[in-house]
Structure formats: C-alpha cells, structure tokens
Amino acid sequence: MKRKLILLFSLILSIIGFSQDNPQSYSLQEAIDYALENNRTAKNAARDIEAAKRQKWETIATGLPQISATIDYNNWLKQQVSLIPAEFFGGNPGEFTEIAFGTKQSMNATIVLNQKIFDGSYLVGLQSAKVFIEISKNAKEKTDLEVRKAVINAYGNVLLAEESIQILERNLEVLQKNLEETTKIFENGLEEEESVEQLQITLSEVKSNLSNILRLKILAYQMFNITIGTDLNSKTFLTDNLESLTSQNIVLNLLEADENIENTIDYKIASNDKVSKELLLKLEKSKALPTLDAFLNGGYSGYSDQFTFTNKSEKWFGSSLFGVSMDIPIFSSLERSAATQRANINLEKAQENLTETEQKLKLQIASAKSDYQFAIEDYENKKQNLNLAQRIEKKNQIKFFEGIASSFDLRQAQTQLYTSQQEYLQTMLNVITKKAELETVLNTIN
C-alpha cells in the first residue's frame, strides 16, 4: 500500500511538472489579447473604473435619506448637586439646601432620519462623478493602447533575437568551414598566415556577437512575459516570424488616415480635464447658495436609581422631533471669492492645455507618419542592400579561394554582409514598431 502511494504521489508530481514546463505559444494578436486581460497595469486600470463607479454611488448616496441610531447609558458615580434657597422648603432665609436632581442612572435610545433637500455642491458632485468615470475609462483606453504597443515591441524584440541567432549560427558555420580550408591551404604552403589570422578575427567577432545575442534572447523572453502579464520565467513560444509580420504591417493606407484629433485618447483626456475644471468652478460658485436640510428623530428614555432597564416593568418615555434647517452663507471675508477666482484661473489653464495638446497631437501624428513611411522605405532599401552584400561576399569568397582576392578583401565583404543582415532585421522590426506607434497616437487599431 505504501509503495502504491509513493508511485501515485510521484505520478502527480510528474504531471504537475510537465504542465509547468509545457510552453505556451502565442501569435502576436494572441499575445495582445492575453496582455489586455492579464497585464497588471491593464488590470489595475480596469479596477480604477470599478472604483469610480463605486465612488459615483457614494456621491449619490449622500443626497438620499440617512438613518442613524444611538443608544446612551449614563451612570452618575457621584451626582451633580444644585443649591436651592432653603426657604423654599421652610428653612431660614439666606441658607441653601443641597439637592441632586434626576435619577442616578438613565438610558436613551434615539433614531434619526436626515434628508438633504437642496445643496448646490451635491448637484455639482453628481456631475463630477459621471466625469470621473469617463476619466477612468479614458485612462483604461490609454493604458490598453500603451500595453498593446509594449507587447508589439516585446514580441518583435524576441523575434529579432531569434532571427539574429539563426543568422549568426549560419555565418559561424560558414566561417569555420572557410577557416578549416584556409588552414589546410596554409599548411601546404599555398597561402599566407595572415589569411588564417583574418578569418580567426572574423570568427572570434561572430562568436562574441552570438554569445551576446543568446543572453539578450533570455532577457527578451523575460520582458515579453512581464509585458503580457505571465510569470517571468514562463516558457513561451512565438508562432509568428519577423518577415511575415513585416509584410502584414506594411499598410500604406494608414499614411493617408484622417487626422481626427478629437478621436485621439490624449485629446479626450485633455478635454475631460477641462470639463473637470469647469465643474470645480461651478462647485466654488455653488458654495454661495443656501443649503436646506430636514430631519426627523424619535426616541425613548428611561430613568432609575438602579439598573432596571432590562425589566419589563421599566417605564420608558417617548419623544419625537421634526425640523428643517437652512444654512445661508452671508460673508466669508472674500474667501469664496478668492476660491472662485482660483478655480477660474485653473479653468483657463485647462483650456490652454487643451489647445496645446491639439497642436502637439497634429505634430505628433505627422511625425509618426513620417517615421512609419521612412521605416517602410528603409526596409525596402536594406533588403536590396542585403542581396547586394550577399552577392559581393560570395564573389569575394570564390576569388579568395582562387587566389585572386586577399583575405582582407574577404573579411571586408563578410563584415559588410553581417552589418547588412543586422540592419535588415532591424528595419523589419522598425516597420512593426513604427506602425504600432502611429496606431497608438491615432487611436486607430487596424
């Protein structure tokens, strides 16, 4: 029986271990969708919306009936004494008699209903609560846009590292083969030692670059995991590749997209800020208006020299009261006036900020379009350059082994090829990220 339990426990552990090691695969869109649900910043932005809704109800509730109850128990450890002229009780004039009024113990139970009838601040508060929810929703929208852009950048960096490793490994394989052949030729006295050394230098540089990219690959995956909201060291697998994503992200129509400033999230946020400042101005003005409140209370009181309040025979005395109170502001030594003027200044600042935001967004959109267009053009240019560099390197390799070209010429051609390879990969990533930046500023997801 003990052996069976051990085997069962081992099987469970192996299943758990397998499930933890099982890598999760993501396309770019799947990664974006996952991040919008699980990214910690995005989740907190969603919580802010829920908190704003609760705060709205808090504001509404302050204008609804408020009911409270109190129970007081009093026990005079030493009753307060009052002095009464003794002649009231047949005593001598000028003398006083010590009397303690009331019972030693008392208990009161009261319930109070308060209702706000009119308060200008309350009406402004209701409007502000709605605006606050809108601000929270805009913040969530901006957060989602930024998370989407961050996922695209992180996804692209992982693919860049993967593609770089594949290219460097192929280059390393070719170089090692060239070095072996050149070394044999040198040993047979048909080649100079410098040729071997030139290839060794190039090989050493490629190995160093490969080691660095392998380290960066680990960091790129960790950054991707953090961005989408999963564990730092989760095993993930990306199903898209850099070249196909580049082709998908060349959307020339985006360069002709309408520059609807009012649709951008930054404009919405600046506009909401202006509305909130308008409400703050209304709030300060409303403080000069009277407030009207009504109340209704009722209660029972009991009195005794001993604690007999739990007895059925205890006598309780009921009371009730209804009232209306009006608070009329008359003079505040210009405090309200100063507060109103300050709120008006802040409103003017918000208006200026909105105008400045509009101007900056126009420039930002134009700049993002320019960067995206350049990224596409640079991609096409670097693609052609890579083809040329490959042809040049191949020709120089043939010439070198035929004894026509020097080892220096070959190394120069190889270095040019490796540079072109990395530039080509980087331009593909630029196409993807620059499109994401343009979509983010336009608030247009294609």
Image (cartoon, rainbow, N blue to C red):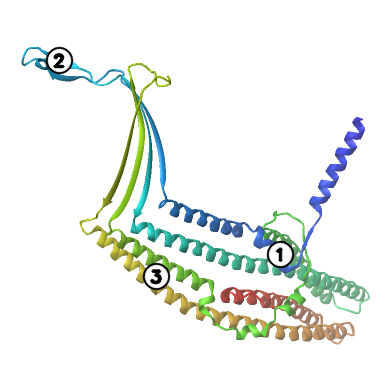
**Residue for point 85% across, 47% down:** 15
Q: Measured from the top left, where is residue 61 in percent x and y? A: 44, 51
Count neighbours of disc 3 (C-alpha within 10 A) and say few if under 14, some if 14 to 19, many if 20 or more.
many
Place residue 8 in its image quadrant: top right
Q: CA distance from mark 1 to mark 2?
A: 90 Å
Q: Nearer the viewer, residue 317 or 12?
A: 317
Q: Amino acid at mark 1?
A: Ala
Q: Is residue 233 positioned above or below 400 on the image?
A: above
Q: Secondary structure at mark 2?
A: strand
Place residue 418 in its image quadrant: bottom right
Q: Is residue 55 positioned above or below 246 on the image?
A: above
Name the residue beneath numbered marker 2. Answer: 97
Q: Measured from the top left, where is residue 107 in percent x and y? A: 36, 26
**Residue for point 91% across, 79% down:** 190
Left or right of 382 in this view: 118: left
* Mark count: 3
Q: Measured from the top left, where is residue 80 in percent x and y? A: 24, 21
Q: Secondary structure at mark 3?
A: helix
Name the residue beneath numbered marker 3. Answer: 350
Q: Nearer the viewer, residue 302 or 285?
A: 302
Which of marks 3 and 2 precedes in the sequence? 2
Q: CA distance from mark 1 to mark 3?
A: 37 Å
Q: Amino acid at mark 3?
A: Ala
Of circles 1 and 2, which is in front? 2
Name the residue beneath numbered marker 1. Answer: 31
Q: CA distance from mark 2 to mark 3?
A: 73 Å
